[in-house]
Amino acid sequence: MSPKTRYQAPRRRDRAEVFKAVGAVAVVVVVTTATVWLLRPGPSDRFDGGGGGLFNRQPRASWLVALTVGALVVFVWYALTRVRRRRNLVLVVGCVGILGVAVLAGTLWPDGLLHTYIGIPDESDFDDLTPTTLAPTGETITVPGVDITIPATDTTATPTETTPTEPAPTETPSTGSP
């Protein structure tokens, strides 16, 4: 008789283990996508009224949200690994407490949490302005190191009616052919 060849049987994964791995991959993909979307850069000037991700437009709110989510993750991990008795109660009370502190911090943040930046006015806002409404004539504008005087102009002049002139007749040169 010949000896039997032994093969190692392929190890089958438990269904729960597969679901955990798929869930972990999904969480990594969602968090990465959200982070890239929230961190996308905006225009270089801050007065355009938008553009870019939330972290670009509202950095204070972003810090508050990021710190709150971080505190919640650390607390939930701690509660699940260290607390044995009344775990559900500890989780609920702790998460509500962290969220309450975040709301309180957002309310009491110095100079306010959210800022609305004033946009650049449209060109149509300047259509009704004339040079006399921009700066009076004869006024000296002082900029550090430079003095500018706006020359006086006659703003009471009315437009004069012009009469069209006829162009002078032009002669065509002869080509010299008979």
Image (tube, helix red, strand yellow):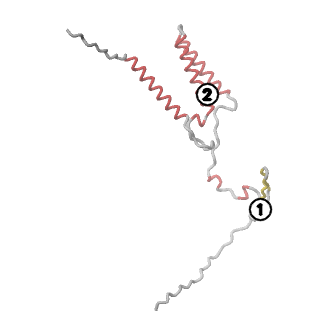
Q: Specify the amino acid type for callout 1.
A: Pro
Q: Which residue is mark 2?
A: 64
Q: Which residue is mark 1?
A: 151
Q: Position of residue 13 (x, y in %)?
A: 36, 17
Q: Position of residue 36 (x, y in %)?
A: 52, 34
Disc assigned to residue 3: none
Quadrant assignment, res 4? top left
Crowding at label 1, few (<14), some or many (≥20) Cα neighbours within 10 Å?
A: few
Considering only order in the chain, which callout, 2 or 1, is on the residue closer to the N terminus?
A: 2
Q: Position of residue 32 (x, y in %)?
A: 50, 30
Crowding at label 2, few (<14), some or many (≥20) Cα neighbours within 10 Å?
A: some
**Separation of disc 1 and disc 2 at Cα?**
54 Å
Residue at (65%, 31%) from the top-left corner? 113
Reply above or below: 89 against 134. Answer: above
Q: Residue furthest front?
A: 2
In the drawing, does residue 164 fall left or right of residue 27?
A: right
In the drawing, does residue 154 fall left or right of residue 19?
A: right
Residue at (61%, 27%) from the top-left corner? 64
Reply above or below: 22 against 169. Answer: above
